[in-house]
Amino acid sequence: MLVRKSRRPVLQAGTLGLLGLGLGIPSQAIAASAKQSGLAGSTFGRAKRCIFLFMWGGPSQLDTFDPKPKAPLDIRGAFRAVSTNVPDIQISEHFQTMAQQMDKVCLIRSLCHDDPAHLSSGHATLTGHLAPVVRSDAEPPSDRDSPHVGSIVAKLRPGSSTVPSFVTLPWVCHHPAAPGGNAPGQDGGWFGKRYSPFLIGGDPNDAQWNIPALSLSNAMVAERLDDRRHLLRSLDHLKSGADAANAISELGAMQEQAFGLLGSDQVRSAFDLSRESQTTRTRYGRNIHGQCVLLARRLIEHGVPLVSVNWHNDGKNFWDTHGDNFNRLKNDLIPPSDQALSALLEDLSQRGLLDETLVCWVGEFGRKPQITAGNAGREHWPACYTGIMAGAGVHGGSVYGASDSFAARPIDAPVSPLDYGATVLHALGIDPSMTVSDRLGRPIQLCDGNVIRGVFG
């Protein structure tokens, strides 16, 4: 095992963006910014694409990728630690398939912050910025939010005009126990809605699943687009003020771009899972998460720069295991995650894509080491948790940072979710320290974190 150390101290039209596609900043400007900040190097821009697996709810670090077999039972829990294909790296026994793929990943065991709220910590994880209102599950999304890393890619390093630049599957993260509802930081934020993701909902494992708009003929797409243009012209007579005019103009641009994509054979092919063999579909897991991850692989193969797969709405509060933690993990959460992540890494490697594809697996925080008496749950714990990176120059078979004997605090190389976001941008060839303008023309730093250089080989 190589322990990496840091030098730093301890489609739904009318809903979430129709299309993650925008006008990019010239590549020369991005390169100049990187050179000025000293970021350009062998790992800068190594990733041509990214699959971001967001484990909404907050997975337990102890029961997944940072087990503590020598801790007391009420800390270590019910699961055994098992060896992997990398000497000295152990993970949970229920990630048995991932145990044979550890040579491809870097475990970041020293992620930490101080925000125990799902919504605001989710914002930090997805954007690389603190939320406008921190430590809050009551603040709904707004145009004050920072853009998702996928929206940053859509603006600064968009894909070709024939595919979306940012796709989200299979839903917008929402927490029924949070007064604010949807997590902020999942759209274009202060970049504007035109950089929000192309949202594809539903269950791709369902035999009846389809994207209705993609089944339209080219003639019908043109007819629908004409209808939208007529509606926008009607709204134009009702608008008043610059803000309303800008909003309608932005909506028009988004819809025109979206319906242009819907007529693309390349886009239709990218979303067509029937082109995959039954063996491959089974390999990823015949469940909503497995098929979303497989779809993400198809999308990046067809030129989509970033695909975010959010943990789905399972009706049981996702990875938020306040109660019955071990049964939920063993039966519902770990098996599909283990199967899909391991299949993705192996598949990308076999296809020769892993060297230029960044794969991320992370939640908004971890779980409390002390098991809750009476209900076998674990509470929120942002003070220490584990995330994963793989591919695109990431040093496989390594561990970055370390936690204490209870996985309660980092004892080496603590890093924040803002740093995690900065590292994603760095790998994708975007300088996280560059200054950009929001939709009102105000200057703002792209990301508040620092690149975790130690994760790279």
Image: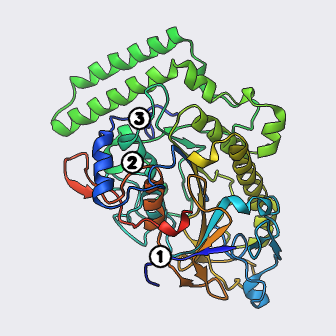
Instruction: Tell me where residue 176 appears, x and y as whole percent.
Output: 57, 59
Q: Quadrant of the N terminus?
A: bottom right
Q: Secondary structure at mark 2?
A: helix
Q: Nearer the viewer, residue 44 or 423?
A: 44
- Whether residue 381 sits left or right of residue 18 in the image: it is right
Colour setting? rainbow
Residue corresponding to mark 2: 152
Residue 253, how many percent across, how many down?
33, 28
User: Could you say which is closer to the camera, residue 129 or residue 175?
Assistant: 129
Q: Is residue 200 left or right of residue 164?
A: right
Which comes before the other along the chain, label 1 or label 3? Answer: 3
Residue indicated by mark 1? 113
Residue type (three-letter) at the residue carrying disc 2: Ile
Query: Hey, which quadrant is residue 20 in on the image?
Result: top left
- The residue lying at 42 percent from left, 56 percent from top is 41
On the image, numbered disc 3 is attached to which residue?
21
Q: Residue sitting at 76 percent across and 60 percent down?
A: 98
Alpha carbon distance from label 3 to label 2: 10 Å
Q: Amino acid at mark 1?
A: His
Q: Amino acid at mark 3?
A: Leu
Q: Up-down: is 333 above or below 15? A: below
Q: Tell which residue pokes out farthest to the bottom in this image.
A: 72
Report helix, strand or loop for mark 1: loop
Q: Residues within 10 Å of mark 1 (few under 14, many from 20)?
A: many
Q: Mark 2 or mark 1: which comes first in sequence?
A: 1
Q: Residue furthest left?
A: 241
